[in-house]
Amino acid sequence: MKIGKDTQNAARRLFRLCMDGNSVAEDRVRLIARKIAERKPRNYAALLTAFYHMVEYAVKSRTATIQSAVPLTEEERSQIQARLTARYGDGLYYHWEVEPDLLGGVRIQVGDDVKDGSVRSKIDRLADLARNLSN
């Protein structure tokens, strides 16, 4: 679906209304989407699509996915959250995963930024280095 410039600008204005500092105010997103769907303004499908993509991107870029080989304690989670807040600011969404394949350590992804301190990544880097040296 091609989205026109006016529709894109309207979606951008609506999206700005949903921002609360660095985070997306979910209640405002729901309210705006519901009002658009009820009133059905001209090009409302394109408007909803553009609005949806902006909200989706904002949420993904503010989502911290933390993977660890074993479940983290509350203290460890608090330390990680404090460091991430210091680096990225308030308004992060946290998603915690236990990934035994990491063998140890933690892998953190916030948006496109990845910090991999897992044992698995270190082993893989050493294996790549060994392959490159043997060639």
Image (spheres, helix red, strand yellow):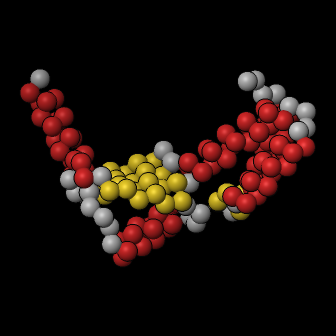
Considering depth in this image, is 72 or 88 the residue closer to the camera?
72
Looking at the rendering, which quadrant does residue 105 occupy? bottom left
- Whether residue 117 is visible here, answered yes or no, is no
Looking at the rendering, which quadrant does residue 47 occupy? top right
122 over 48 or under it: above or below = below
126 over 2 or under it: above or below = below
48 over 113 or under it: above or below = above
In the displayed structure image, the side of residue 80 where residue 127 appears, left or right: left
In the displayed structure image, the side of residue 65 where residue 92 appears, left or right: right
| Residue at x 87% of width, y 45% of height | 38
Considering depth in this image, is 3 or 44 the residue closer to the camera?
44
Figure quadrant of the N terminus: top right
| Residue at x 45% of width, y 48% of height | 113
Considering depth in this image, is 45 or 105 the residue closer to the camera?
45
| Residue at x 50% of width, y 67% of height | 86
Percent across and percent down for residue 52 are 70, 42
Percent across and percent down for residue 90 are 58, 66
Residue furthest to the bottom in view is 75
Figure quadrant of the C terminus: top left
Residue furthest to the front in view is 38
Percent across and percent down for residue 29 are 74, 53
Percent across and percent down for residue 46 are 78, 32
In the displayed structure image, the side of residue 135 where residue 28 appears, left or right: right
- Whether residue 18 is visible here, answered yes or no, is yes
| Residue at x 16% of width, y 41% of height | 126
